[in-house]
Amino acid sequence: MGKRGNVKGTRIRFGKPHKFEVVLLVLALIFFAWSDVLQNKFLDNSLEYKVTVFGDIQFTAINGFWIAIFIYHILLFILIITALFRNDRTQTGHVTDGIVGIIMTFSTSLVILGSIGGIYTSNIPFFSFNTSVINVYHIGVAGQILGGLFFAITS
């Protein structure tokens, strides 16, 4: 089947994931990358910046960002739910998938906070210190990439 690893007492199966999960992950990453491009467009230019999709079809970058993030969220939740409720998982596999899913959901919130916060300010107060919105955004992106890799390499 796949190699078994032991990470702090939790058994994780490394191997080939299900095809449906791979398709969901690829689609989710495409929409995540699309939202990243659109986020860069409206932060570099303005909220009224228009992007061309196909031919003469145009819309504002901020609207495309919200559409892409919304579709990404839907695909992410479907991916997490299918990973959690698959029959061939052990109970510890469900726990690990749930934790990684929560981290990815929290990371998506950081991406949105960094994106929208970049419109209004360059720093966000975090407890007793300020951090830049770019740092918050990239911490969220790192969480998304690590979570996506987890779902890609575990079966």
Image: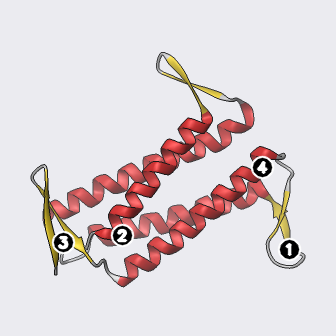
Alpha-carbon span between mark 2 and mark 4: 31 Å
Residue 146 x, y percent position in the rendering: 39, 55
Q: Is residue 13 left or right of residue 62?
A: left
Q: Amino acid at mark 1?
A: Ile
Location of mark 2 (residue): 152
Give the residue furthest to the top.
128
Q: Earlier in the sequence, mark 1 or mark 3?
A: 1
Location of mark 4 (residue): 42
Residue shown at the point (28%, 60%) measured from the top left: 97
Residue 58, by quadrant, is bottom right
Residue 114 x, y percent position in the rendering: 60, 40
Determine whether 67 is above or below 119 in the image.
Answer: below
Q: Earlier in the sequence, mark 4 or mark 1?
A: 4
Determine whether 23 is above or below 105 in the image.
Answer: below
Residue 140 x, y percent position in the rendering: 50, 46
Q: Earlier in the sequence, mark 2 or mark 4?
A: 4
Residue 9 x, y percent position in the rendering: 9, 52
Alpha-carbon span between mark 2 and mark 1: 34 Å
Determine whether 125 is above or below 143 in the image.
Answer: above
Mark closer to the observer (3, 4): 4
Mark closer to the observer (2, 4): 2
Q: Amino acid at mark 3?
A: Arg
Residue shown at the point (15%, 60%) measured from the top left: 92
Q: Earlier in the sequence, mark 2 or mark 3?
A: 3
Give the residue furthest to the bottom.
19
Q: Amino acid at mark 4?
A: Phe
Location of mark 1 (residue): 57
State the quadrant of the C terminus. bottom left
Location of mark 3 (residue): 89
